[in-house]
Structures are given as structure tokens and as C-alpha cells.
Image (spheres, helix red, strand yellow):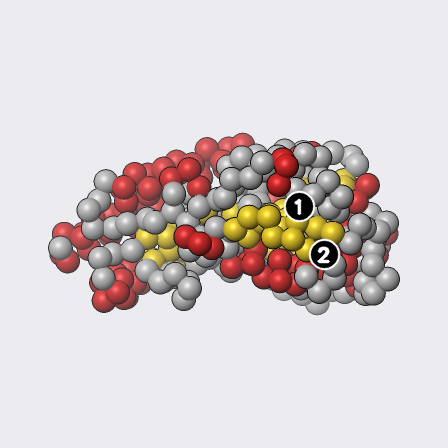
Amino acid sequence: MRVYNFSAGPSMLPIEVLQEAGKSITDYNGSGMSVMEMSHRSKWYDAINTECLDLVRELMQIPENYHVIMVQGGASTQFEAIPLNLLKTGKADYIVTGNFAKKAYKEAQKYGDIRLVASSEDKKFTYIPKTSPSDFRQDASYVHITENNTIFGSKYHTLPDTNGVPLVADLSSCIMSEKTDVSKYSLIYAGAQKNLAPAGVTLVIVKDDMLGGELPICPTMLKYRTQIDANSLYNTPPCWSIYMMMLNLRHLKKTGGVEAIEQINREKAGMLYDFIDNSDFYNNYVEKDSRSIMNVPFVAPTDELNAKFVKEAEANGLVSLKGHKLVGGMRASIYNAMPVEGVKALIEFMKKFELENK
């Protein structure tokens, strides 16, 4: 029996995508071998690589003056790759809104004058801090934000006005969940394991004018130009993860694209938040204007009830609801592949649990 998997990542994939992948697990497209076995220099894999990159461009409507590459090491590797590639002036400004934003800020400090402009750590990352254009240094190479905070369940709904300083953003847990105006960013990066594909590949979208200022110590493998020039094939890529991303993006396109999935995602998040807000048993502690539509943390009245909730939910086919260790409680990650029916099933269980444990 398939369960509803609310994991923050790796997350569930559409059943149609898994079924399509299953058909070709031993013989892809008449090649007589699996994608996991074939050379990344083969004509079969080259076609997969090209189609995947093309689908990213199409679905996100990426302008021509941006490069799209697929790299390894997860989004966390980009915490170092970004300053190593982009720190032209030796300065960058960071906003810290969660655990991963804090890690990115810490890593960047190894390479230059990195300034913390704003943080929401004072209230346990339960809000997105307000900034003004004058907060940012005009000679900063870039401003870094984490747009959606997986652990704490907050999100930027309006991008900061950086007064022309290039904006760099981690979109790992919200990529393609809603329409994104790529032209407002100078670099976007995202680990695949939430909305795109199984873990293994990371997507980087970088504006052409951001290139050319790599620090001398930047390793060849971390240089964006290396993978741009090689069409993301400089070294052996995570072929299966990229193949799965291609299938998933095909499915997203077939079902209406980013615009259609955004409507579904807002419907899912809306019904879950409405239930929590109208309950005197559950609580979501994120400020309402900062709430994520992908990651919804909530708590019951006691730690004992939280633990009981997670255990009983799993027995009812609602899995991976335990909150991150930094937060506790529960967290429902309702990424693109989570159907409306999954959220409805969670709400029905929450109602039942509340009645039985008040």
C-alpha cells in the first residue's frame, strides 16, 4: 500500500513518474540497459541531459542571458561555490532566516567580508525580517537569501529590495512550487530532492554577467564556467537522478506546468493552515505573513502528545511527520507530488486525534 509521505526530503514523487521509470529500469528506450548503467557520453544519456535542461528553461521561463547547469554535492555545496564564484568585490551581504541560511552565511565567511544584514533567529526563525534598500552595501557582490525555510516553515513572499545589488537565492524547498520571475535573481540554486527528483543533483541558474570573477582558489569542479562549457557533463553526472528529474518535469508540463501546480499547492496549504488556525489543540508558530506553502510545522499541547501523534499517524499511512530536532512537534511537507487527497487525509486524522486526546 502506498502511504502519504510528508518527508521534508527526500520527498515523494508522482506515482506516474515512478511507474514510467519502472518500465525502463532494465531497458531504457531500446538501449538494452538501464540509465543507471549507460555511459554519460552515450547518445541515449545525452538526449536525457539535453531534454532535462530544456524543460527547466521552458517551465521556469528562463531568459536567454541565464545559464542552467546541473551539479553534484547538494545545495549545501553551493554555500561555498557561491562565494568562490561570485565574490568579485570581496564583499557579500546575507540574511539569515533558518538553519540552512545560517550555514550558508557561516561558510561564506571563509572567503571574504561577509556581513549579516538581518536575522530572525531572535524569535526562533518564525518570521521573515524586514529590510530596506539602504541596509545593503552598494559594493557587495551579492545579497544571499534562503527563500523557503524547510525546518522552520517560513518563506519570503516579497523579495527584498536590494537597491540593485545582485540577489542570490536558495530555492531548494520551493523550486517550481509557484511561478518565479527569474529575472529578479542573479543566481538561483536548488537541491532536487524536494520538488524535482531523487537526491543527487542540484540545479543552478546563473545570470551571465555574474561569471568571470572566480577566486583564484576556486576548484575546477566548483567553477560554474566548467559545467557551463561542458553542458553539465564535465564529469560523470548523477545520471539516474537527472533522468528522474526529466520524467518529473515532463509530468509537470503535461499536468499544466508551474502555474497549475501553484494553484494546487495554495489549495493544500490553505486548507491545512485553516484547520490549524481554527483548532484550540494544534498550533503553528510562524507569523502568518511569513508562512511557507511547502513546509507546515505544527504542535499538539504536549511533547507526549506530539510523539503519540507521529506514531499513530504512521500507523494510519501518514508517514514522516516528525518535526526537525531543532523544532520538535510535527511538520507536514506538502511538496508538488503530495496530492490534495493526502492533505485531506492528514486533516481528518488530526480531527480524530484531537477528539480522542483533548
**Crowd around label 2: few <14 · some 14–19 · many ≥20 (10 Å):** some
> Residue 91 at x, y = what percent?
74, 52
Quadrant for the N terminus, please.
Answer: bottom left
Q: Residue at x 68, y 55 (%)?
A: 114
- Relative to residue 229, is residue 312 drawn left or right? left
- Comes first in the chain, label 1 or label 2: 2
**Residue 159 position by quadrant:** top right
Above or below, comparing residue 106 to residue 120 in the picture: below
> Residue 336 at x, y = what percent?
49, 45
Residue to which mark 1 is pinned: 143
Q: Residue at x 70, y 43 (%)?
A: 137
How many labels were placed on the picture? 2
Please name whichever residue, 196 or 356, is drawn nearer the observer in this view of the structure: 356
> Residue 296 at x, y = what percent?
39, 49
Dot 2: what SS? strand
Is residue 33 at all visible to an observer of this figure?
no
Residue to which mark 2 is pinned: 113
> Residue 228 at x, y = what percent?
81, 51
Please name whichever residue, 303 or 242, is drawn nearer the observer in this view of the structure: 303
Q: Identity of the amino acid at label 2? A: Asp
Quadrant for the C terminus, please.
Answer: bottom left
**Crowd around label 1: few <14 · some 14–19 · many ≥20 (10 Å):** many
Q: Nearer the viewer, mark 1 or mark 2?
A: 2
Above or below, comparing residue 251 to residue 200 in the picture: above
Q: Identity of the amino acid at label 1? A: Val
Q: Residue at x 80, y 50 (%)?
A: 89
